[in-house]
Structures are given as C-alpha cells and as structure tokens.
Image: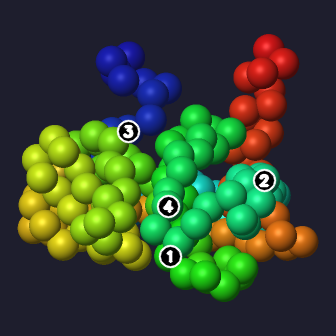
C-alpha cells in the first residue's frame, strides 16, 4: 500500500505561484494601509469639524458685561468668561454701539502672560517680553509681531444700553456643570 494513499496529491509549487501570492499580499497590505489612512484622516476631519461647528450648531450665549456708560473712551476692564478665560474689554469710541468696544483675550499668544491696555500708548502691552498689540489686537512689537500672533477677539453686542459678550454655549454649559458639581 502506497504511503500517501487516500490523501490529496500535492502539486509542486511553481515560481509563478510565489509571485502571484506575493502580489496578492502586497495589494492587500496596500489596501489596508490606504484604508487605514482614509479612516484616520476621516476621523481627523470629523473631530476638526465638531470643534469648529459643535453639535449645538455653534450657538452662543450673551453674557452681561456692564452698562455702556460704565466704560469711558480709553478705559478698559477685565472680564472672566464662564470657561475661565480672561478677557479685556476696552472702549474706543463715544457712540453707544458694539463697534465702540472691543473684547480681546488678555492672554498673550506668545507664552501666555497677561496683557493690559495702555490708554496713553493706545496699545495692549505684555510685560514679559515687551510684546505689544494695537487697539484691534494685531501684533506691533516684540515676539508676537515676529510670529504674527494676534490677540483672540470676542464678539460684543449692545442692547438696551447693556454691553454683552458672545460666548460659545458649550463653555457656558461646562461652567454651569462645574459650579453645580
Ligand atoms: S509672553 Fe507676551 S511677549 Fe512673551
């Protein structure tokens, strides 16, 4: 009785078979890599989109700052957003409209020091490295100018003589949850 009786006959592998199987392996590895990259980038764009356009449709809440007559032209006041972010709000013109005021982050975009408004120099100044910004938050001196780093600006609204600042709803909800928790 033959040794391999009852077992399927094994065909000797030819060199072409090896090449085909290598090619198939390469194609499936490439397909996996490309698919993985597509998923990765897809997730990146999805997260970026959710950050820029949150699920609440980018809704904002208006927080009361002060009455318009509480700030005179050239004066500024600090304000803390519900998120804890520090903002400086300055009055730059006489009219009782939102355009007469400006709200800028008081955190220097260079290394995070506090900036303050210098009415006499008509600029925001950062004492850490002598950085300065004009009245619109554009960099005019020091490291922020070299790196073209602007102060972040927040929208304002004047209604019934009240000055209000627009803040993203998400940050208000988080701040309220922290207060309750
Ligand atoms: S931290 Fe403001 S200029 Fe460096």
**Residue 92: assigned label:** 1
Task: Compute the Cα span from label 4 to label 2.
Answer: 18 Å
Give the residue pinned by disc 4: 75
Residue at image location 33% in from the left, 18% down from the top:
3
**How many numbered marks appear?**
4
Which badge, 3 or 4, comes first in the chain's sequence?
3
Measured as percent of width and height from the top left, residue 18 is found at 20, 54
The answer to whether 66 appears left or right of 14 in the picture is right
- Tell which tag, 3 or 1, sits nearer the viewer: 1
Measured as percent of width and height from the top left, residue 36 is found at 43, 54
**Residue 9: assigned label:** 3
- Tell which tag, 4 or 2, sits nearer the viewer: 4
Which badge, 3 or 1, comes first in the chain's sequence?
3
The answer to whether 43 appears left or right of 11 in the picture is right
Measured as percent of width and height from the top left, residue 118 is found at 32, 59
Residue extending farthest right: 160
**Residue 163: assigned label:** none
Task: Compute the Cα span from label 2 to label 3.
Answer: 86 Å
From the viewer's side, name the closer residue of 165 and 180.
165
Q: Are marks 1 and 2 in contact (CB under 8 Å)?
A: no
Which badge, 4 or 2, comes first in the chain's sequence?
2
Give the residue pinned by disc 2: 64
């Amino acid at each position: 009785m033959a040794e391999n009786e009852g077992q399927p006959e094994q065909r000797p592998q030819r060199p072409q078979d090896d090449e085909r199987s290598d090619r198939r392996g390469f194609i499936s590895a490439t397909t996996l890599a490309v698919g993985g990259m597509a998923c990765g980038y897809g997730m990146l764009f999805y997260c970026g989109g959710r950050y820029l356009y949150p699920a609440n449709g980018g809704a904002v809440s208006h927080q009361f700052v002060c009455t318009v007559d509480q700030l005179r032209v050239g004066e500024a006041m600090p304000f803390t957003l519900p998120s804890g972010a520090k903002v400086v709000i300055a009055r730059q013109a006489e009219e009782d409209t939102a355009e007469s005021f400006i709200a800028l982050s008081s955190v220097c975009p260079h290394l995070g020091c506090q900036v303050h408004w210098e009415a006499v120099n008509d600029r925001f100044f950062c004492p850490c490295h002598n950085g300065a910004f004009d009245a619109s938050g554009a960099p005019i001196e020091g490291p922020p100018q070299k790196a073209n780093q602007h102060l972040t600006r927040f929208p304002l609204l004047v209604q019934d003589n009240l000055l209000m600042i627009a803040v993203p709803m998400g940050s208000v909800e988080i701040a309220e949850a922290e207060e309750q928790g």
